[in-house]
Amino acid sequence: MGITSLLNALPGAAAQGLIWGIMAIGVYLTYRILDVADLTVDGTMCTGGAVCIILMMNGCNVWIAMLGAAGAGMLAGLVTGIFHTFMGIPAILAGILTQLALYSANLKIMGKANQAINVDKFDLLVSLRYIKNVPITQNTILIVAILIAVLIAILYWFFGTELGCSLRATGCNPNMSRAQGINTNINKVLGLMLSNGLVALSSSLLAQYQGFADINMGRGAIVIGLAAVIIGEAVFGRIFRNFALKLVSVVLGSILYYLVLQTVIWLGIDTDLLKMLSALVVALFLAFPYWKSKYFTKPAKRGGNTNA
Amino acid sequence: MLEIKNIYKTFNPGTINEKVALNGLSLKLKEGDFVTVIGGNGAGKSTMLNAVAGTWLVDEGQILIDGQDVTKLPEHKRALYLGRVFQDPMNGTAATMGIEENLALAKRRGKTRLLRPGITRKEREEYKELLKVLGLGLEDRQTSKVGNLSGGHRQALTLLIATLKKPKLLLLDEHTAALDPKTAAKVLEITDMIVNRDHLTTLMITHNMQDAIAHGNRLIMMMDGKIILDIEGEEKKKLTVRNLLDQFEKASGKEFSNDSALLG
């Protein structure tokens, strides 16, 4: 295989990376800000696409359909939030329960395991056909990039508001937050809704991009999301300190992930092994901070800090 | 200001780990009282503070803050009336947020948090003045993440956070115990300064008898989930560690067993 086939595939990979970047921002909100690993997203990553396609097939405008998708995702987040706070189920388990329930929900939404949408018959916002040889205003990469810029601007504003600050405090120190009169349970639910709304939005774009929604399209989504977050932090963590830039680095992490993936495929790896490879890479990245603190920290200086 | 009426709390009831932590405890604080609380391990000091703060609900009895019955009120609602500082400096601040952001969180205690700005320029100026009073140079590091501060600085900041909206009651749970003696003295000095300035009604747990005697206008000693000694006013001013121990032995019929309370 020549290098040209790789170069031809890269724009598509970048577009996918961008679309998954929105999903990764959702994961960042729960994993980094709220400090819970939310596995709901494996289900939501299909729900968004399913809702979007069904709405469009029933005559909805693409923007309305995407809003509907985001709404459905928020609903899924609400369910996980209620499982976790009101019913006291550990966050990971609460996410797994919702994810399982969503499998049925997704089948019911689509009516079958796979629902295609024809790019020629519907007015889609993005598609893998809109990567090359289309007017710049129709270019998928540009459209998703603008969408991401808007989303990041909104999130940047939101996390600077009173409510946004209380959400950050909830994830950072729940005890302190409650002592400041913050209802941490409501905030957790809110964070989960926000996150899953973003994931479903990403899913609605992905379904349009690939031209179908599939019951399995969310499988392992959390791993891809985490990979994007971790890669983004590892590569850009030292230069991007501002919150908005951190979100940008998550998106860049997602793009990098897909570019690397594309390259690995081009190198001729058995594609059946891709998920295992992703899992191992994420496991290693998650282990690094732990190993670093365990084996590579300098012993504390004796006598302590005198100017405490 | 605070009235605790005959409260009971048993942890793990019906199991082998059953522990009666509060056993018919009653206490009444007047406005402006600064009460130091001492007692051995497991005497119920922290449990009493947690009961007041609403970490969990008590089994029996009643808790009133400023005449209002808060017995059944959840923790985040009681927070309106309370300022709290814990032993662990990590506990009272949000480490990944800036110094001024932490103060801004406290400033909005008791208000509904919506989409207004989390911190305004005017507040920044205000916080600068507040931080200056601590005399720790924190006013020049307003945007620094709290996680980068030393334990002593964090405790001083926590005190500021806890008292920013004047609480009806300030709860200090061994808030200097994790600090080295010099820093602990500084934090206690700041505590005195803030409590006196704002005339705060305060409950301060300490394991240091010397501190318990030197600070506040009233001293109580707890054992087995009850108050066994209550000394205030002129009598408290004359206290020494020696005669506190004698009184303890008289009241409890035991020798005081907590060495760390005697040292220090």
Image (cartoon, coloured by chain):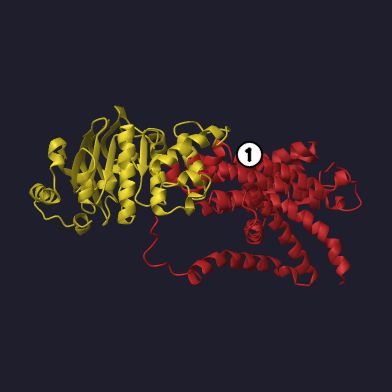
Chain colours: A red, B yellow
Q: Is residue A267 above or below residue B129?
A: below
Instruction: Estimate the x, y position of residue A285 in percent, counting from the top left.
Output: 60, 65
Q: Which residue is mark 1?
A: A157
Find residue B142 and report its horizontal and vertical position in percent. 51, 44
At a point 86% along the width and 69% down the height, the residue shown is A3
Q: Is residue A135 left or right of residue A264?
A: right
Q: Position of residue B201 (x, y in %)?
A: 29, 34
Residue B203 appears left or right of A146: left
Q: Nearer the viewer, residue B167 or A307?
A: A307
Amino acid residing under circle 1: Trp
Residue B131 placement, left or right of A99:
left
Is residue B37 among the parts visible in the rendering?
A: yes
In the rendered image, the vertical position of residue B196 relative to residue A192, given as above or below: above
Find numbered disc 1 in the image and state the secondary structure of the residue it sits on. helix
In the orientation shown, which residue stands out farthest toward the top?
A: B67
Relative placement, left or right, of B7 versus A221 is left
Q: From the image, which quarter does the N terminus of chain B lie in?
A: top left
Q: Residue at x 50, y 41 (%)?
A: B100
> Could you tell me which residue is drawn at 30 percent across and 28 percent down?
B66
- Please give the name of the residue rendered at 78% of the width and 51% of the height, measured from the top-left corner: A212
Near mark 1 (Cα within 10 A), the count class, few <14, some 14-19 or many ≥20, is some
Number of on-image labels: 1
Could one spot residue B226 in this view of the protein?
A: no
Q: Chain of mark 1?
A: A
Residue closest to the eye, A151 or A51 = A151
Picture quarter containing residue B219? top left
Residue B8 horizontal/vertical position (percent): 24, 42
The C terminus of chain B lies in quadrant: bottom left
